[in-house]
Amino acid sequence: MLDRSERLKAFSKWRLTYPPGTKLQFHLTSAAWVIGELCERITGQPIAQYLRETLTGPLGLDSIEIGPSVDRQGDVARFIRTDDDDSDVNPWGPGIWRGQRSLQPESPATRWSPPRRTWRPGIRRCCRHPCGGARSLKMRCGSA
């Protein structure tokens, strides 16, 4: 959600599920909203402008996107393992933080994600279903 007034309106409706610091809770869309808001409060610039001026512009990149469509992934960097293991890369990681699973078997992300057997090294896709997945996070920094 790039419109700040709508984002702040949505924030005002959020309620804590757990006491702060007791459990990890993450959602692809809302996490990006928080990052966008933090960026604007700290830098005084919307995140797209900040990234364009400090990251994509100096690097000569036309854009940076989270979750580009499959037909636009030709120049997307591959996942790289640093442990010299040639096994398949799991972009979701082990799903464990502080000894607790962050993705339970019954969670929407687990249910709607493609089966593991369809993943391959360098995978660049993620949840595209109505769960508010990465498609809703698409951000073009190359345009105003």
Image (cartoon, rainbow, N blue to C red):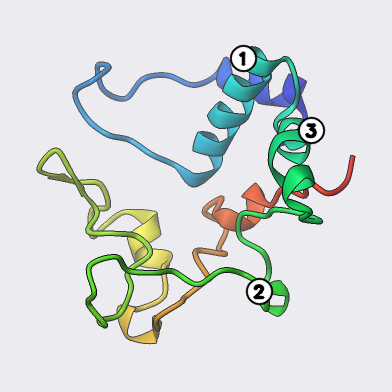
Q: Horizontally, is 84 left or right of 37 in the view?
A: left
**Residue bearing mark 1:** 42
Instruction: Find out whether the residues at labels 1 and 2 contact each other: C-beta distance under 8 Å.
Output: no
State which tag comes first along the sequence, 1 or 2: 1
Task: Look at 79% across and 33% down and name the residue there.
Answer: 49
Decide: is 18 above or below 135: above
Q: How far is mark 1 from mark 3, CA to CA?
A: 13 Å
State which tag comes first along the sequence, 1 or 3: 1
**Residue bearing mark 2:** 73
Disc 3 marks which amino acid?
Gln
Image-quadrant location for residue 130: bottom right
Instruction: Name the one closer to the observer, 48 or 2.
Output: 48
Disc 2 marks which amino acid?
Gln
Decide: is 24 above or below 73: above
Task: Look at 41% across and 75% down and name the residue there.
Answer: 114
On the question of residue 110 being in view, the answer is: yes
User: Which quadrant is the C terminus positioned in?
Assistant: top right
Decide: is 29 above or below 114: above
Decide: is 128 above or below 61: below
Alpha-carbon neighbours of circle 1 within 10 Å: few (<14), some, or many (≥20)?
few
Q: Horizontally, is 105 left or right of 115 in the view?
A: left
Residue 67 is marked as none
On the question of residue 10 being in view, the answer is: no
**Residue bearing mark 3:** 49
Alpha-carbon neighbours of circle 2 within 10 Å: few (<14), some, or many (≥20)?
few
Residue 54, given in percent of the width and then of the height, sits at 71, 35
State which tag comes first along the sequence, 2 or 3: 3
Q: How far is mark 1 from mark 2, CA to CA?
A: 31 Å
Task: Look at 55% across and 19% down and name the residue there.
Answer: 13
Residue 113, given in percent of the width and then of the height, sits at 41, 68
Task: Look at 23% across and 20% down and name the residue there.
Answer: 21
